[in-house]
Image (tube, rainbow, N blue to C red):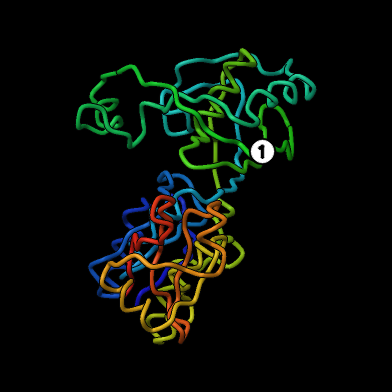
Amino acid sequence: MDGILNINKPGGKTSFSIVAMVRRLIRERRVGHAGTLDITASGVLPVCFGQGTRVIEFLMDAHKVYRAWVKLGIATDTYDATGKIVQQGDASNISQEQLESALNSFRGLIRQTPPMYSALRYQGRRLYELARAGITVNRKSRLAKVYRLELLDFKPPMVTLEVECGQGTYIRSLAHDLGQLLGCGAHLENLVRLKYGPFDIKDAVTLPQLEDAFSHNSWRQLVYPIDIGLLHWVAVVVDDARERLIRNGGSVVIENGLDRVGLDRQCRAYSHDGCFLAVLNFNPESRQWQPEKVFV
């Protein structure tokens, strides 16, 4: 089978360990996850297998929703509760009005500097490897998109937030930067991913549930189709002649207005019997659709 599992990753396990578990259970070499969760974080982790691994790159752009608990008054080198304390401040005088005002700085298109304890690479090495060796390097700030940032609760020194954001947003950095803006320091105490694109934590399967489903050979009921994350694209159904062209990597003309609109640069192509066939890209010069990925 090819597909995607919506797994509720528990805190204390790495995202890679979840992939290794699924690889062992399914006995499939091609297994990967979309969107790493830190070892202390929990929540939605889409795990793709078989040809599902080929849509991971498209899932990366999906919106994510997080529940974040931020502790004011203490900043750490990892920006979360696992790190060494590097700053302590008095957060007792921070009012809810001050907090709400500070949160306005983190809505919309913002700039973030990735934490040293992250999986980004610098000259071929992971930043967290350098950090563990006591090496700090300059990191370029980069744009991140925060679509929604809500203050759910404020019981000093704990702040509870819900964040809806795009690809590459570090919630740890948001917590740290919030503390710097308030002048008291802060770190991310806990994090749960509630949603990842079409995947919701309410539907996510726990590891014990997953193992139980495999022991009873009912795990296939938990599998999502590989096009589940692409449903916001236009879908087209092609005839047998176009299907053969697409399967062989050939471009096709789709005579349903898509080639004239030019707004949708990607679409989902299906065979006449409803099988997901390919991801197509529009070429405005030739006015044809070129297969980017073909699924056999």
Q: Residue furthest left?
A: 124
Q: Position of residue 211 (x, y in %)?
A: 40, 74
Is residue 98 toward the left or the right of residue 136 in the image? right
Q: Say what amino acid the circle numbered 1 marks.
A: Leu
The one of 11 and 288 positioned closer to us in this rendering: 288
Query: Does residue 196 appear anywhere in the picture?
Result: no
Question: Which residue does the numbered mark 1 point to in the structure image?
Answer: 161
Q: Position of residue 253 (x, y in %)?
A: 43, 67
Where's the N terminus, which quadrant? bottom left
Residue 134 quadrant: top left
Q: Position of residue 146 (x, y in %)?
A: 60, 36
Is residue 210 toward the left or the right of residue 99 in the image? left
Residue 214 quadrant: bottom left
Structural crowding at the residue carrying mark 1, measured as other residues with C-alpha within 10 Å and reported as few (<14), some (14–19) or many (≥20) = some
Q: Position of residue 74 (x, y in %)?
A: 54, 21
The residue shown at (48%, 53%) is: 265
The one of 157 and 220 positioned closer to us in this rendering: 220
Query: Does residue 192 appear anywhere in the picture?
Result: yes
The one of 188 and 245 positioned closer to us in this rendering: 245
